[in-house]
Amino acid sequence: MSDKNTHETATDGGATRAAQRHQNTDYLNEEVNLLKPSTAYMRDHLRIVWAGFVAWALIVFGPVTMTAIAPEMMTTTMPVLGFPWHYFLVAFCGPTGALVLAAIYARQRDKLDEKYGIEHTTGDPETGEHGDSGEAAATDGGVEQ
């Protein structure tokens, strides 16, 4: 008779193991190499950065390159707005795409930090206290008036 209840299934998608590995890693002694990251966290972060860079290059340089390759198509006027395609894509879609990419990067980075158990608190790292104690912060550099 087999016992089906003795085998536990990881329901966290491996997040706990990744967070444990991240906390056991001494990042001050790990080699930092942009082309060959040494830790899983660095590899996952680099994957996000490279994907964002490729998307950014396509968004920013794509319309300009298309205008150089196919000027007849890109200089035609848009039916509704009345702008030439190359003007609209460079003036509106380029900056908007960069803004959307920044939001996507922030969300992906938050997911990555959550996967590796990285918390973003505003506390004192020396004492381990979190910044939610309700005490006022000295914003004048601590000078008594």
Image (spheres, rainbow, N blue to C red):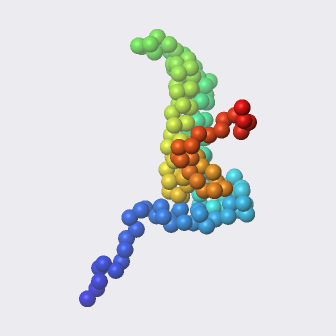
Where does the image place residue 134, in percent across and percent down from the top left?
53, 43
In which image quadrant can residue 8 be found?
bottom left
Left or right: where 23 falls relative to 1 = right
Position of 94 relative to 132 (above/below)? above
The residue lying furthest to the left in this view is 1
Which residue is rendered at x = 73% and y = 63% of the image?
29
- Residue ID at (62%, 40%): 137
Q: Is residue 75 left or right of residue 33?
A: left
Give how far across and how far down residue 104 sits, in percent: 50, 40
Residue at the image position 58 percent from the left and 36 percent from the top: 56
Q: Residue furthest front?
A: 145
Coordinates of residue 36 in the picture (x, y in percent): 68, 58
* Residue 19 visible in rendering: yes
Placement of the N terminus among the 4 image quadrants: bottom left
Question: Would you place residue 73 above or below residue 134 in this image?
Answer: above
Relative to 105, does residue 79 appear above or below in the rendering?
A: above
Q: Nearer the viewer, residue 117 or 70?
A: 117
Given residues 109 and 60, the one toward you in this image is 109
Residue with the most extreme bottom position:
1
Q: Is 111 placed left or right of 9 in the picture?
A: right
* Res. 51 visible in picture: no
- The residue positioned 56% from the left and 47% from the top of the image is 131
Q: Is residue 23 above or below residue 63?
A: below
Q: Quadrant of the C terminus?
A: top right
Corner quadrant of residue 7: bottom left
The x, y position of residue 102, in whole percent, is 55, 36
Query: Camera-side residue: 123 or 136?
Result: 136
Numbered-mark total = 0
